[in-house]
Image: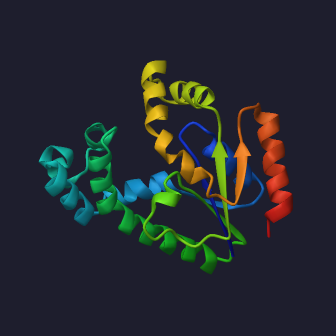
Amino acid sequence: MRRWAVTGPTGAGKSAVTALLAARGACVLDGDRLGHEVLAQPGVAAAVAERFGADCAPGGAVDRARLGRRVFGDDAELAALDAITHPPLCALMENRLLELEAQGHALAVLEAAVYFRLPAAPRMDLVVAVVATAENRTARLAARTGLDPAAARARVDALAPLDRDWSRADLTIRNDGGEAELEAAVDALWAAHAP
């Protein structure tokens, strides 16, 4: 089974690219959903409560909104959360990829914004970065989440230090045009690299 990762900053269009790949026959794993599964693990929730306070995991369930407010924009706090969540996330990603391989899938695509930040990222045959201008990402994020434009821009700007990560990808798709241009880029990717 071939393994691809799709990574990039928020609002760039990772989900749009993975949806187009799924429509062409790829089996997609959503890294965000896997992250939510990790936060639901009792040991992880207990570690979050111990490190960040019981109010971040009341009753043994992580309050993602409260935790997000606690770590967003604070590099040290985010690093502490990553140290708790990333090792089990890597293990879960690898396990799911192995399950897909055992099921006979030809191509698995892992959508993971944090791919290059993982301490033991699953091995991939191809890593694709989806990028876009800060202005386009801000507009998409505001439209998708209902955030006001200033708050959306603050989230986009907070990820600026990660820009160097996207340059580590094997291929880059720039998503500053319309749907037809993005579909053409995915067609080219598929034609060149699909199994």
Name the residue: 58% across, 30% down: 134
Q: How are the residues colored?
A: rainbow
Q: Is residue 46 left or right of residue 6?
A: left
Name the residue: 80% across, 43% down: 183
Name the residue: 47% across, 33% down: 157
185 lies above or below 194: above
* Camera-side residue of 134 and 20: 134
- Tell me residue 112's x, y (percent): 53, 55
- Tell me residue 131's x, y (percent): 64, 42
Q: Tag count in the figure? A: 0
In the rendered image, the residue lying farthest to the bottom is 102
Q: Is residue 151 left or right of residue 99?
A: left
Name the residue: 82% across, 35% down: 180
* Camera-side residue of 85 and 9: 9
11 lies above or below 31: above
Q: Is residue 3 left or right of residue 11?
A: right
128 lies above or below 66: below
The answer to whether one can see residue 148 in this image is no
* Camera-side residue of 23 and 184: 184
- Tell me residue 119's x, y (percent): 42, 67
- Which image quarter is the C terminus in? bottom right
The image quarter containing residue 63 is top left
- Which image quarter is the N terminus in? bottom right
- Tell me residue 177's x, y (percent): 76, 31
* Camera-side residue of 75 and 18: 75
The answer to whether one can see residue 32 in this image is yes
